[in-house]
Amino acid sequence: MIEKMTIGRLASAAGVNIETVRFYQRSGLIDEPSKPHSGYRTYEESDVRRIRFIKRAQLLGFALEEIAGLLKLEGSRACADTRALAARKLATVEVKLSDLLAMQKALADMVSRCGVEDGTDGCPIIRALIEDTQPPAQG
């Protein structure tokens, strides 16, 4: 027997809040069931699985539009299309990671300069930001 649940139980089972469920409905990621005469829309376990899918995809950096595309591929034999989408996302993540590592190095270099310079010319971090240059790397 398929268990029916209210939006509150759906949200709880999926680990999200009710507004997230409603947002996904407005975004077209999950269907909004018709409202019966009793007044309460009911959801099924498949809706819980779909919301969890969306949340996991978001954690991997997929945008809602990309997730909608993945959901259209779900159940089909479109593994090559799914792989291509995931490969593009991986490439984007690798670029972002490279940028973050460069930012980390630049900030670490600036922070290390603060303790070394005497400060007579002002803060080396502020000076580097004003001059739009990075201080030379230490040692």
Image (cartoon, helix red, strand yellow):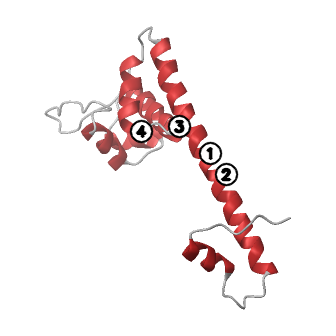
Q: Earlier in the sequence, mark 2 or mark 3?
A: 3
Residue 83 locus on image (x, y percent): 52, 19
Residue 139 falls left or right of residue 107: right
Quarter of the image where one finds residue 37: top left
Above-or-below relation of 38 to 2: below
Residue 37 falls left or right of residue 82: left
Quadrant assignment for the N terminus = top left
**Mark drawn on residue 101:** 2
Cβ atoms under marks 1 and 2 closer than 8 Å: yes
- Marks 1 and 3 sit apart, C-alpha to C-alpha, by 9 Å
Quick one: SS at disc 1?
helix
Please tell me how crowded label 3 is: few (under 14), some (14-19), or many (20+) other residues with Cα within 10 Å: few
Residue 75 locus on image (x, y percent): 42, 13
Q: Nearer the viewer, mark 4 or mark 2?
A: 2
Amino acid type of the residue tagged 4 in the rendering:
Ala
Above-or-below relation of 116 to 65: below
